[in-house]
Every structure is written in C-alpha cells, then in structure tokens.
Image (cartoon, rainbow, N blue to C red):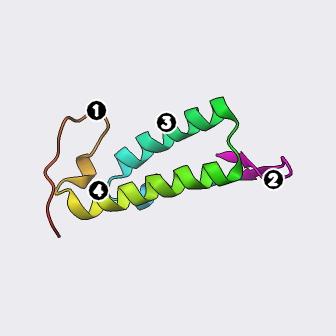
Amino acid sequence: MTGLDPRGHPVTVVFDPSSRTCAGLAGELADEWVELAASMEFRLRSCCGYRDAIASFCAHVDATVDSARDASLARRSLTCTTR
C-alpha cells in the first residue's frame, strides 16, 4: 500500500497477512484496505492507522476465536473464548 507523506511523496506501508493465525481474514481486510486507500489517495498517517487497526483486530481474533484459521468476512459467526 502506498500513502503520501506530508510533502506528497509516496511511501510504502506494509501489512503481512500470513503472520496471523487468521491469515485468510487478514488478507480479506487488507484487500478492502487497499481498495479504499486507492480510491481516496490516503495520506501516510491514514494508511498506517488502517494497517494498525487491521493488525489489532486480527490479534484480537487470533486470541479469542477458537477457529481463527477459519475466520472470514464471508462467515456468519465464530465461537469466541476468554483466553
């Protein structure tokens, strides 16, 4: 993903879905992020904020969903635990 720094120069922002247990969900969220950012010419701070939100949400899913590997935007529900 590329965001624009305060001077308007492009800067690459990276998110690696494969580092998550819920890699499928992380990839789906990253795809949505890329589409949104491309349509709106996000600034660097916005790109980083969305990336961090996706990472935080995926960390939560990894920690609380029994079948995090199966998590997907297409699924209706998953069982959460209090680990």
Question: CB of mark 4 within 8 Å of CB of mark 2?
Answer: no
Give the extent of the magenta segment: 1-11
Disc 1: which residue: 74
Viewer-proximal residue among 61 and 22: 61
Say which quarter of the image contains residue 36.
top right
Q: Residue at x 29, y 56 (%)?
A: 61
Amino acid tagged 3: Glu
Using the numbered discs, state the Cα–Cα distance from disc 2 to disc 1 in whole angstroms.
Answer: 37 Å
Please give the label number shown on residue 6.
2
Q: Is residue 53 magenta?
A: no
Looking at the image, residue 76 lies above or below residue 1: above
Please state the horizontal and vertical placement of residue 46, each as a whole percent of the image. Answer: 62, 49
Looking at the image, residue 82 lies above or below residue 16: below
Say what secondary structure mark 4 lies in: helix
Mark 2 or 1: the one toward you: 2
| Comes first in the chain, label 2 or label 1 | 2
Disc 4: which residue: 61
| Comes first in the chain, label 4 or label 1 | 4
